[in-house]
Image (cartoon, rainbow, N blue to C red):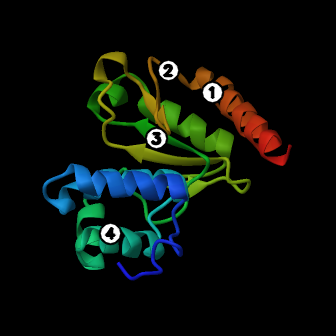
């Protein structure tokens, strides 16, 4: 790291400290890569070129190596998502219990398709292969929240809940 890299970090001081602690935790620095990318994505919103460069620099690998790993994982994204990223599982268990109808209702209500972001930036939507909730299908994940045993009629209430949360967070940041 160059002498000024810490003062010019794209990460908050809290995240920078967390990333530094991760690097120290693992005997091989590269082992910290996935958690570092997830934490960075949570703060920045996606893996921008600057995020990839900063992570590569922190663990001493090339940006290409970071990209090669990051492109493998579907939960890592290279473009901004909404404040609430809705992932609708359409794998076999969810599909058999109505996931496509659920996904279609989200598309209709939000006016976006796969990997789309609403114009206000509150929601993004994607169809995913599996979120590991097969026994409670159909299921979705909104950021880190799992919602299961859903049906298309539950979509408006789900969206209302997260819209309220976004509005509350917006009002709190303006106070």
SS label for mark 1 = helix
Observer-side mark, 1 or 4, equals 4
Q: Quadrant of residue 53?
A: bottom left
Q: Quadrant of residue 47?
A: bottom left
Q: Earlier in the sequence, mark 3 or mark 1?
A: 3
- Disc 2 versus disc 1: distance between alpha carbons? 10 Å
Q: Earlier in the sequence, mark 3 or mark 2?
A: 3
Q: Earlier in the sequence, mark 1 or mark 4?
A: 4
Q: Which residue is mark 1?
A: 158
SS label for mark 2 = loop
Q: As rendered, which of 84 and 126 lies closer to the eye?
A: 84
Residue 170 in the image, given as x and y percentages of width and height: 77, 44
SS label for mark 3 = strand
Residue in the picture at 82% in, 41% down: 171
Residue 45 in sight in this render:
no
- Disc 3 versus disc 2: distance between alpha carbons? 13 Å
Q: Quadrant of residue 97?
A: top left
Observer-side mark, 4 or 3, equals 4
Q: Which residue is mark 4?
A: 58
Q: Quadrant of the N terminus?
A: bottom left
- Disc 3 versus disc 1: distance between alpha carbons? 13 Å
- Disc 1 versus disc 4: distance between alpha carbons? 39 Å
Asked whether disc 2 touches disc 1, contact meaning CB atoms under 8 Å apart, the reply is yes
* Label drawn at residue 87: 3
- Disc 4 versus disc 3: distance between alpha carbons? 30 Å
Q: Which residue is mark 2?
A: 150
Number of marks in picture = 4
Asked whether disc 3 touches disc 2, contact meaning CB atoms under 8 Å apart, the reply is no
């Amino acid at each position: 790291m160059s002498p000024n890299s810490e003062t010019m970090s794209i990460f908050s001081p809290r995240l920078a400290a967390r990333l530094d602690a991760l690097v120290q935790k693992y005997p091989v620095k590269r082992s910290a890569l996935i958690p570092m990318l997830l934490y960075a994505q949570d703060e920045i919103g996606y893996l921008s070129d600057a995020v990839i460069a900063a992570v590569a620099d922190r663990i001493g690998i090339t940006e290409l190596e970071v990209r090669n790993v990051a492109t493998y994982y579907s939960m890592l994204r290279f473009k901004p998502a909404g404040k609430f990223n809705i992932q609708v599982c359409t794998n076999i268990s969810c599909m058999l219990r109505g996931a496509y109808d659920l996904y279609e209702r989200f598309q209709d209500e939000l006016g976006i398709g796969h990997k789309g972001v609403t114009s206000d930036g509150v929601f993004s939507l994607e169809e995913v292969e599996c979120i590991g909730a097969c026994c409670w299908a159909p299921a979705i994940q909104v950021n880190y929240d799992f919602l299961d045993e859903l049906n298309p009629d539950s979509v408006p209430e789900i969206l209302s809940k997260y819209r309220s949360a976004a509005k509350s967070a917006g009002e709190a940041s303006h106070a």
